[in-house]
Image (cartoon, rainbow, N blue to C red):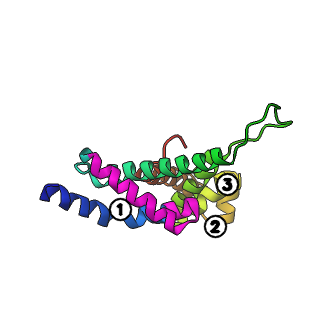
Amino acid sequence: MPDDELQLMRVLHDEHSAALWAHVVRLTGDRAFAEDVVQETLLRAWRHPRVLDQSGNSARAWLFTVAKNLVIDDWRKGRRRLEATTSELPERATVDDIDARLQAWEVDEAMRRLSVPHREVLTECFFRGHSVQEAATNLGIPPGTVKSRCHYALRALRLILDEMGVTGV
């Protein structure tokens, strides 16, 4: 590996590995597995040098997407090992909710990264289902401020989700 690529890999590791590891731990609850996922993700980045030439945010999004896919792939492999074949259909089908759970964890992580005022207004309006007036009363701020904060909070949330490599939320 040329010295410039080696330096770019070091920068990529230094800038993103801790956040990537923390994200995978939140997804899986397994610290050792998270280390393996981060290592595999960085190995894949090394195999795709175009990632090294990207800006910090787009490289980070790529890394988070690869890590999430590795977690999903591992979960699916484990599920296949637990499946048994049978000639009879089960009485009731089970729902695969791993994608919904991962999405919920990702949104929760993104919400934690928002400022407190943005998090409060989104919680009031979207998670608690309050009207602008009810949110304004609960937060002790004018209704216009609630509308403004909602607008900017949603923009900030989208940027955070993009940075994390989350799509389709």
Question: Residue 136: percent from the left, percent from the top?
Answer: 64, 60
Q: Locate residue 54 relative to residue 87 in the image: left or right.
A: left
Mark 2 Cα shell of 10 Å, populated few (<14), some (14-19), many (≥20): few
Q: 42 or 51: nearer the eye?
A: 42
Q: Amino acid at mark 1?
A: His
Disc nearest the viewer among 1 and 3: 1
Is residue 2 within the magenta segment?
Answer: no
Question: Which residue lies under the disc numbered 3?
Answer: 127
Question: Which residue lies under the disc numbered 2?
Answer: 140
Q: Amino acid at mark 2?
A: Gly
Quarter of the picture holding the N terminus: bottom left
* N-terminal label among 3 and 2: 3
Residue contact between numbered discs 2 and 1, judged by CB atoms under 8 Å: no
Q: Which residues are magenta?
A: 24-48
Q: 88 or 159: nearer the eye?
A: 88
* N-terminal label among 1 and 3: 1
Question: Which residue lies under the disc numbered 1?
Answer: 16
Tell me: residue 124, above or below residue 94. Answer: below
Question: Residue 60: percent from the left, percent from the top?
Answer: 36, 54
Residue contact between numbered discs 3 and 2, judged by CB atoms under 8 Å: no
Question: Residue 154: percent from the left, percent from the top?
Answer: 51, 50
Judge whether residue 159 can be spotted in this image.
no
